[in-house]
Image (tube, rainbow, N blue to C red):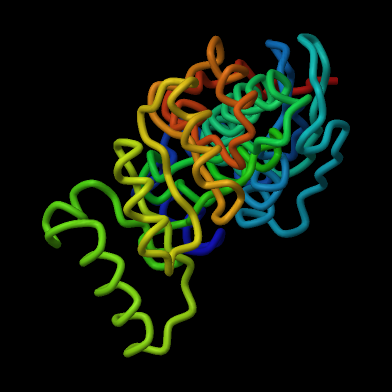
Amino acid sequence: MDTKQFIAAALQEDIGNGDHSTLASIPADAEGRAVLKIKEDGILAGVQLAQDIFHYLQPDASFTIYKNDGDTITKGETAFEVAAKVHTILQAERLALNCMQRMSGIATITHQYVEKIKNYKSKILDTRKTTPLFRAFEKEAVHIGGGHNHRMGLYDMIMLKDNHIDFCGGIEKAIDKTNAYLQANNLDLKIEIETRSLDDVKRILAKGNIHRIMLDNYTPEQLAEAIQLIDGRYETEASGGITIDNIEAYAATGVDYISVGAIIHHAVSLDLSLKAQIS
């Protein structure tokens, strides 16, 4: 789903057969102005999407940006001002706010994680633990907050997790079958495989033919031992049980990536509001 399709579907969900509150109280030709007010400190995200929403409803709407995606924001600041038909402002208001609040919350928590390990080489990754049909924007917010995107979906990277391995019949069989599948279908996709123990790591190192090893639910001490075993032969990724309080211990092991589902599914929406400017 591209941005226009998303906006169209979201507006249809909200407006349905008509914004009757606005239709009943505001003349169709009325013009107005409104400003996006910041009510909470954080990292701003979703400004471009908000602009797209207003311009979808009214291409000639005037949209003046004062704070850009990725900017540090403080309570009381103004992010943008829009001048348009009042019907446009009132119909776009909730969708624009919902998107920006959600995206800004994600960007803010991502930035907190990134800052926590800024002195290490490890990179913060998101996951597929996202809101259906809003994934692209949530992952954009992660990027805005300084994080990195993992695969977008099931189609752009091979990830052999515990269930794949168990259903397939073991690590070696899963690797062999995956490489045969990629070759047979002329697909150029990287292979990541999950491990649950140091024995799994040793089996993968003996087998080869993968690109990244996921080390799931390891303690920092176990992770450090695994990193030493792998010795740079493959990319490494830590996941599971990682929080803002313990992430530095994981980064200190030298792991390449740390995936944190919480930067999306535990993000709290940032408080923003769209207020009419009455002269």
In the displayed structure, 92 sits above or below 21; it is below
Q: Nearer the viewer, residue 233 or 265?
A: 233
In the displayed structure, 22 sits above or below 172; it is above
In the displayed structure, 191 sits above or below 278; it is below
Task: From the top left corner, tell me how far across and down residue 47 is, in percent.
Answer: 72, 40
Residue 120, quarter of the rendered image: top right
Q: In percent of the image, x 45 and y 49: which residue is there?
A: 213
Task: From the top left corner, tell me how far across and down residue 55 is, in percent.
Answer: 69, 54
Q: Nearer the viewer, residue 58 or 167?
A: 167
Q: In percent of the image, x 66 and y 24: which residue is there?
A: 274
Q: Nearer the viewer, residue 24 or 198?
A: 198
Of the 4 image quadrants, the one containing the N terminus is bottom left
In the displayed structure, 201 sits above or below 102; it is below
Q: In percent of the image, x 30 and y 82: which residue is there?
A: 180
Task: From the top left corner, tell me how far across and down residue 275 is, in percent.
Answer: 69, 21
Task: From the top left corner, tell me how far across and down residue 37 is, in percent.
Answer: 74, 19
Of the 4 image quadrants, the one containing the C terminus is top right
Left or right for 163, reference 8: left
Left or right for 112, reference 173: right
Q: Nearer the viewer, residue 275 or 127?
A: 127
Left or right for 40, reference 221: right
Residue 33, quarter of the rendered image: top right
Q: In percent of the image, x 60 and y 28: which residue is there?
A: 253
Number of numbered discs = 0
